[in-house]
Image (cartoon, grey):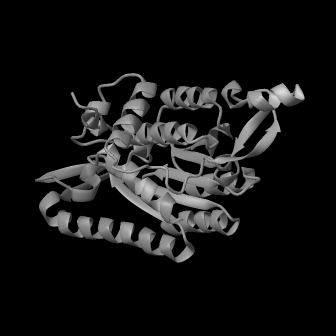
Amino acid sequence: MSSTKYLKPEVIAGIKRLDLRAKFIVKGFLQGLHSSPFQGFSVEFSEHRRYAHGDDPRDIDWLLYARTDKYYVRKFQAETNLTGYLVVDQSASMDYTYRQEVTKFDYAICLAAALAYLMIHQRDPVGLLTFDEKICRSIRPASRPSQLAAILSTLSRLTPNGKTNIAKALNQTAAMLRHQSLVMVLSDLLTDEEAVLEGLRKLKFAGHDILLIHILDEAEVSFPFDGALELEDPESREMLRVDAQGFQADYVKQIREFRERYAEECAKIGIDYLPLDTSMPFDKALAEYLSKRRGA
């Protein structure tokens, strides 16, 4: 099997270990590129600083040690240019799929793992926040190799449940951040739009870069149903009976307008908005991510 086939969600679903999922997604993606994916991600040498516990020994400048008898590490531009936070929705509404092999939550976890792998590979510090009605788990940003293991271990143990309050989680995130950062939010955004947008505005006005990754199930975008249906809200458990044929056109229109509203409002305030669905190969998602970052 070629490495590019590992980019398909249905193949990724069959790989049990999250570290292997992340590796296959990123390595397969990088092999598919015709030019360096790191344009706009500087990892060139900048200066030296004293070695500190947790630094990668491979970054020690041994020539400088020979002259000074002190340990210094080579400091890279990426250490100061980009600190990332993955902010992952773990609420119950993410635990849905109709006919794909992965749920929205599975897709978000795989993509978050790949982004963490990619940032660590670039020597960019990255941290993790997960939320439902509030921030549930947090890992401070770091760029050492052990950071990836910590993030993947946390992601692999997550279970989607509970209601969601994205606006509250965004406000908590804003209160936690002390330095300008890249905040990558992965969610289905199935809650009050204006409250979410207000939370995003606060983060943006505080000086943070934001990449809003909007993940819906393929069926939530196209509504491929027939006949009489009973739809259940995964968080409130409320039921709605509809006739699929009569409901489809209005539903698809509302979903299109839902995404367009986010695209328009995010564009107004300089937030990168990335709409995805669970049938989309991971290479397309990562290509969009890199495109957004290069244009930042």
Q: Is residue 238 visible?
A: no
Above or below 141: residue 226? below
| In the image: residue 200, left or right of residue 192 | right
> Residue 146, image x and y in percent?
62, 26
In the depicted view, which residue is nearer to us: 80 or 174? 80
Q: Is residue 160 above or below residue 250?
A: above
Towards the viewer: 82 or 180: 82
Residue 34 place in picture, x, y as percent: 33, 49
| Quadrant position of the C terminus in the picture | bottom right
Q: Kindly give the residue lying farthest to the top in the view shown.
A: 16
Horizontally, is 116 left or right of 286 in the view?
right
Say which quarter of the image contains residue 209: bottom right
256 vs 180: above or below: below
Numbered circles on residues, count: 0
Instruction: Work out whether residue 94 or residue 51 is closer to the camera in this orientation and state it.
Output: 51
Q: Is residue 250 left or right of residue 159?
A: left
Residue positioned 23% across, 69% down in the render? 250
**Quadrant where the N terminus lies?**
top left
Foreground: 157 or 280? 280
Residue 157 at x, y percent in the picture: 51, 26
Residue displayed at 66% across by 27% down: 58
Q: Is residue 224 above or below residue 248?
A: above
Residue 139 visible from this viewpoint? yes
Taking the image as shown, residue 49 lies to the left or right of residue 191, namely right
Task: Looking at this view, name the residue that lies furthest to the bottom.
Answer: 268
Q: Position of residue 97 (x, y in %)?
A: 29, 41
